[in-house]
Image: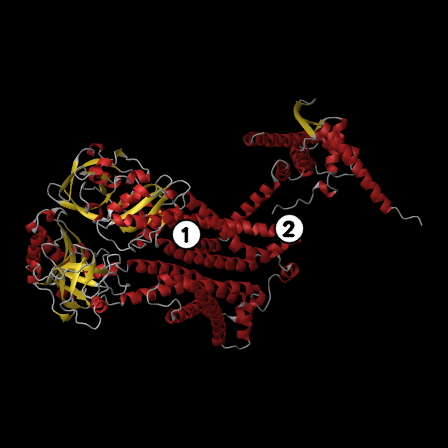
Amino acid sequence: MPWFQKLFSRRRIYNDLSEEIRQHLDEKVEFLVAEGMSRSDAEHQARREFGNVTLLEEHGREAWQWPAMNSLWADVRFGLRQIGRYRAFTIMAVTTLALGIGANTAIFTLIDSIMLRPLPFPQQERLMRISGVFPKGWIRELQNRAESFTSITGYGPHAESNIEDKDAAERVFGSSVMVNAFDTLDIHPALGSFFSPDNAIAGQNLVTVLNYGYWQQRFAGNPQVIGQTIRIDGISRKIIGVMPAGINFPYTDTQFVIPISFKGGDTFDPWKDFGNRSIGRLRDGVTPAAAQAELRRLHPHLLPLFPWVMPDSWEADTTVTPLLDSVIGDTGPRLLLLFGAVGLILLIACANVANLMLARAVSREREMAIRGALGASGWRIVRQLLVESILLGILAGIAGLSAASLSLRVLTRLLPADTPRVADIAMHWDVFLFAAIASVLTGVIFGLVPAIKMASPHLQSALRSGGISVAGKGSQYKLSMLLVVGQIGLSVVVITAAGLMLHSLYSLSRVNPGFRTEQILTAEVSLDSSACKQSGYCHSFFQQLEQKAHTIARTEDVALVDKLPMTGSDLNYVYDSEGNPRSPRQIAGQAAGRIISTNYFQTIGLRLLRGRLLTDSDQSGASRAIVINQKMARSLWPNQDPIGKHIIEVADEPTPATLDLNAASIVVGVVSNTHHDSLASNFDEEVYLPMTRSNEQPQMTILLRSHLPATQLTSGLRRAAAELDPLVPVTHVRSLGEVVAASASTPRSLAILLLGFGALAVGVGSVGVYSLIAYVVSWRRREIGIRIALGAPRWQIVQAVVKQSLLLSIAGSITGLAGAIVSASLLRNFLFQVSPFDPLTFCAVPLLMIILALIAAWAPARRAASIDPMLTLRGE
Amino acid sequence: MTPRKTSDPRDLFPGALEMMILQSVRRQPMHGYALVQHIKQRSNDLLQVEEGSLYPALQRLLKAGLLKADWQTSATNRRVRVYKITPAGVKHLEHEVSRFEQMLEGISLVLTPAES
C-alpha cells in the first residue's frame, strides 16, 4: 500500500477505535442504568471499570505505529519541553553554539562559493591555465600545434580605458581577448554574437563585446545596442555582442573586451607584446600532466619562430593546471586557515555547552536515577539526552545560519582585495546541508559526554542523599575541568594564530618603503591610449599639466610617474649592460622601470648616492641619461664606479645581446632602494627613465606634495587638467600612504579576521571558565559556609576560588601552547619576518589567558566570600 | 520515555489476553463489550480484566491480521464493531495454545513436590 494511503487508512482506523470505545462505554452505562443505577453514577462506574480512556486509546493506536519512530517522537517532544523549561540554559547554549555554527557556516559559504563551485563554463574541469606571459604569436602557434588541447586561447592585460560620452570620459576596465576565447570557454552570447575569425585581422578588429553587468548599467539592458558604436580610447568600435550574465572574463571587473588582432605581413607584430596569458581546453582523456609535457616538448621547436634569438629558458617550464585552481590561487590556503580557526571555535562552543549540560546534570541526577529505577536502560537515557542536545544543536543551527547570512556581506568586505569570485559569493544548497550536518554533529559532540555520564548515575546514593552533601564531590566536576582546560587550550591556539598574524602585520607596517609617503596625494590622469599616435602630444600634455599643477596654491612638489610603486604594474625593463655580456640564448637582465618627471626623486624623497639626478634637459633625450638604484649598481658593477656605464633595453637592440654604445642609455646617478613591489618584498633592481618624447605615455600618475586638504588639491588638479583637455579623466585619487597601505591589505584583512575569530574564541572560552567557577562555588556553598563559620578568613576563600581559576587557565595555556606549536608551522607562509614560534606571541597569549582567568574568577570569588554561614547552614 | 502502565493485563504473561480473545472470537464473532463480558463470565470473574485494556490488544491482533472487524448493527440497534477470527488467527491460536500448555505442563512439573 502506498504510504499516503496508509496515512489515510490509519486515520480511519483511529476513528474506528474512538467510536468503538465510545460505544462500549455507552453500552455499559445503559446496562448499569437498566440495573437501577443513576445515569451519572453509571457513567462514573463505566469509566472506572474501563480504565484510562485516553491512555488506552493511545496504546491502541500504538499498535499501528512504527515503535522506534514513535518513541523517538516522544523523546523529541520531551526534549522540546526540557528546552522550553530551562530557558536560561537554552538561551546560553543556543547563543554559544549559534556563534560557532554561524562562523563555520559563513566561512564554509566562502569556501563553497570560491573554491568548490565550478566556474560557469561547460565542462569547466577541462579548462586549463597555461602558465606564463606570452606574445600573441606564441599562443597562436600553441593553438595550431598542441595536440593535447581542443583549443588554446589568450587574453591581454587588465587595463583601464577611456570610454567617451559627449561631455565626459569615464575610466572603464577592459581587456583584449583572442577571437577564439569564447569558443574555448564554450559559452554563447546573451545578445548578438561573439568575435569571428575575421576580427583577428587588423582593420577588421574595430568591434567590442560587452560584459552583461556593464550592458545593464550603462545601456540599461537595451537590446538596441547591438550595432551601435562606442568610443573606447578614442577609437570607435561596433558593439557586436553581450556576454551572458555571471560571466566575468577574463578579469573580475572586465566590462568589455576587444579582439586581439594580427597585422598581416608584419613579422614582428605577433611577437612584440609579452603581455598575454593563456588558457586552453583539454582534449578528452588527456591529463594536465600529459598536456604540460607536450607543451614543454614543443617549446624548443617554437622558440626559433621568434624573429630574433630568444633565450632558451624563456617560459621553458610552463605548467598546465586546472583553471579553477589558478583562479583560486593563494586564496585557498587563506580560507582554509580561517576555516581551521572557526572549526576550533565550534569545538570551544561545544565544550562550553557540554559543561553547561554537566552542571545541569547534577540537578537532573534524581530524575535520571528515578528513570533508571523505573527500568529505563542506559541506552534509552543516553538516547533521550542526545535527542535533547541534537535539538539544541538544530536550534543553534537555525540561529547560526541566519547569523551567517546576515554577516556574509560584512565578511565579504573584510576579505583581502585580491580574493577571486567575490561576486559569486552566495549561500547554495550545500551550505544549508553543511549547516544541518554541523548542527546535528555539534549536538552529538557536546551531548555525548554529559549523556553518558548522566546515564550511569550512582542511583542509590543520588536517591538517598537527595543531592545534599557537605563537601563538593571532586569527581563531579573533574570532567568539567577537563573540558574547560581543553577549551582554554583551543582558545590559545586560535589567539596564538591571531597574535602571530598581528605581529607579522606590525613588522610589515614598520618596514620603511624607502620613500616618503607623508602629505603626498596621487591621481591618475589618462589620455586616450591612442593619443600618443600623434608624436609628442602626450609628452607636452603632461609637461603642461605638471607646470599648471605647480600653480595650485601652496603645492610644494609636483612630479609625474608612469606607474606608482606598489601598484603591481611596473614597466618590465629587460636590458643588457656594459661589462656583462651574454649570449642571445641566455636570459637578459630585468629591472623595474619607471618613467618619471625631473622632480620625482625630490617629491618622494629618494636619496642620491652617486652622480647626479635627472634634469629637465634630460627630457629631450639627447643626454640618454638614466638613474639606477643602489641594488642594481651593486649587482651590475660591484666595486666599480657605475657612473658613465651603458645600459640598453633589449627592445632597442638591432641584434640581440649586443650593446651598441652609441644607442645605449648612460647611467648618470645612483639612488637609494625602495620596496617598490610591496612592503614584504625584497629590494630589487630599479631604473628611472626621464620622460621623453620617445617613451611618452598616455597615462601618468601625478604626485602632489602639499599641506592642503586632499579635496582642495583634487579640485585644483581637476581644474588644471580640464583646462588642458576637458575630457581627460582624473581618477584613483588617493594618498601615497594609502597606496602603500593597500599593498599590505591581504595580511591586514587576514589578521583582522583572525583577530575577530580569536576574540570570539576567547569570549566563549572565558564564559566557559566563568560558568565553571561560578558553578563550583555554588556547589561548595555549604562547605564554604562551614569554613567561614569555623573562622576561615574571607580572603582565603577568595584565594581558593581564584587559585582554581588560575590553575585551570595555566593548564589550558600549556595544552594550548603545545597545540599552537604543532599548528604554527601551518602559518609559516602567512608570516612576514615573524617566526611561527614568535616568543613575544607565545608569552603574551598565556598572559592574556591568566588575566582573563582572574577576571572570570572575580565575580564568583566575591560571591563565595560573601556567603553568610548562617543562611547556608540553615538552608540545610 | 513513555511511562509504563501498571495495570497492563500482559502482567499475567505476554499474549494471555490475546489468546483469550482469539479463543472467544473463534467460538463466536462478537464486539468489544460482549467480549469483555464473555471473558469475565467464563473466568468466573477470577480474571479482573480492565475493560479498556481489551482494545489495544484488539488493535494489535487486527494489525497482525489475526482478526477482522466489521461494523454492524446489533440486536439492540447499536452500531457495533464485530470481530471475527481469520484463518491466520486460527493457526496462531492453536500454536499459542499448544505452547501455553507445554509451558503450563513444565511449570506444574516443577511445582509438583518431587516423589522420592
Q: Nearer the viewer, residue A19 or A43?
A: A19
Say how the picture is coloured. Answer: secondary structure
Residue that badge 2 annotates? A376
- Point out residue A79 in the picture as x, y percentages from the top left corner: 54, 48
- Mark 1 or mark 2: which is in front? 1
Q: Nearer the viewer, residue A711 or A245?
A: A245
Q: Numbered disc 2: what chain?
A: A
- Point out residue A156 in the picture as x, y percentages from the top left corner: 24, 47
A213 on left or right of A494: left
A53 on left or right of A239: right
Mark 2 crowd level (few <14, some 14–19, many ≥20, 10 Å Cα): some
Inspect the image, locate mark 2, and give the three-letter code of the amino acid beneath it.
Answer: Ala
Q: Numbered disc 1: what chain?
A: A
Q: Is residue A363 visible?
A: yes
Which corner quadrant holds the N terminus of chain A? top right
Location of residue A49 with respect to A90 vertically, above or below: above
Which corner quadrant holds the C terminus of chain A? bottom right
Instruction: Tell me which residue sits at (10%, 43%) in the image.
Output: A167
Residue that badge 1 annotates? A102
